[in-house]
Amino acid sequence: MKDVVSFVINANRFVPSRDDGDRVVYSRTLSSMPNIPQAMNDIDVSFIEKGLKLGGALPDGARVSAIDIKPLSLNGFLSDVGRCHITYEGVVDNDEDGTTPTPPARLVIKLAGAQSEAGEEIARENNLYHMEAEFFRKFAEYASVGTPHCYAAFEDSKFGNVILLLEDLQDRDGLYFVNQLEGIRRKEMMDMAVSLSALHAQHWSWEGAAGLPAWLPHCTDITVRNPCNPAHMEKYLSSAFVDEAHCASRGVGGEVRKACLQITERADEIREAMKRGALTLCHNDARSDNVFFGDRSGAPGGVVLLDWQIMSTGVGAADLAFVASNSVTDEPPSEARDKAYVKAYWESLTSRGVDPDRYSFDACWHDYLLGIAWTYACLTVFIEFGEAEQMLEDPLCRAMHDRSMLAVEGLRVHELETFERH
């Protein structure tokens, strides 16, 4: 078999290309490269120019003359992300027939690498860099939810490195971003409910995983979304995350802490329940920092979802629960608050073809509560990214973890007799 070192994909033109002996590559443009940059500092003018040409974004006669890459303030747990400002030569402004592409003034560059060695190790073990490239190859163009435009995706199949050249959504009219520490409000959460329902209805499978692409993992098979990892659960339960005095100092002591400890005891039950019943394509990380909001002209349903590394098969309502439990800050968790989210989700889901007789509102609400439990149990994985005291000093880590604790107790999830799906 020929060793294909790397391939480049124009990720918004999906036509079958050729079989490289390992897997079929879907792209309009396929190009072998001797290597791809291993770090952000290795990316140069020629690489950006090549990517824009392959993506059809650089008109004939134009060239990239200079780039300036700065790290994004909101870097990922699992990736290295930067904003690239681009200077061109030979770009003509007067495009009379409207057919000449206008190259982007800025790109967001995303590549393999993380804030910590542990984060990068988890991403590579779970093939998450490749998984995001697969999303832009095989799903993005037809997704019912808003996504950033991907100009090109580069994947080095020998070393497992991936580089994505993505649209900078700050340049798309009508969109805005809400920092996760600030948190989203009911308006944004309702938009999330409708947008996620569109994604889930589009890929709904009554047959579970059997009705979805076989190469997609189930969410519980991904380390950062597995609620029942004995090794990290043992470390977590002896750490400051759930230490009685430490929890009390963070406002999650007493009944909140007790409720969450009961959830940890049922982690295996949660994992098995997540595998049963109807499944769909899930984002699995649809928190505020991975979303742009706006009007419908800028995004289908008013939402653009970023960061598709953890996409998998899963329970749709749990996708909704993930964002609600750790991103909403204008109202505390309550049955009234959260049922409003689930009602909007379920009504939109069933209006898009999911049979309401087979999937009732009560079943959807139960799945949402399962998702609240799953979210908290999954976030115990933070213990793998560093010492508990160190992680709890990170405002984002602490906010995600402790908000999910409050959601468990606020919705009385620990009192469910069973997590088995209806």
Image (tube, rainbow, N blue to C red):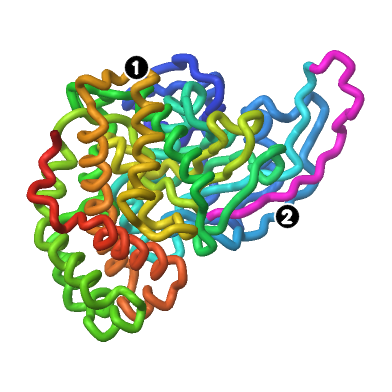
Q: Which one is nearer the viewer's eye here, 193 or 49? A: 193
**Kind of residue sitting beneath label 2:** Asp
- Magenta range: 81-98
Q: Which one is nearer the viewer's eye here, 412 or 289? A: 412
Q: Can you tell which mark lies on residue 68?
A: 2
Q: Is residue 163 left or right of residue 46?
A: left
Q: Looking at the image, do the residues carrying marks 2 and 1 touch, with CB atoms under 8 Å apart?
A: no
10 Å crowding of disc 1: few (<14), some (14-19), many (20+): few
Q: Is residue 199 above or below residue 411?
A: above
Q: Can you tell which mark lies on residue 353?
A: 1
**Kind of residue sitting beneath label 1:** Gly
Q: Is residue 102 above or below residue 110?
A: above
Residue placed furthest toward the front: 336
In the rendered image, residue 162, in percent from the top left (x then y), is placed at 47, 43
Q: Which one is nearer the viewer's eye here, 360 or 172? A: 360
Q: Secondary structure at mark 2?
A: strand
Instruction: Pick the quarter of the image with the C terminus.
Output: top left
Camera sees residue 2: no
Quarter location, residue 299: top right
- Disc on the earlier residue, 2 or 1: 2
Q: Is residue 71 above or below residue 145?
A: below
* Residue found 65% across the figure and 42% down from its top: 175
How many discs appear? 2
Q: Is residue 144 left or right of residue 297?
A: left
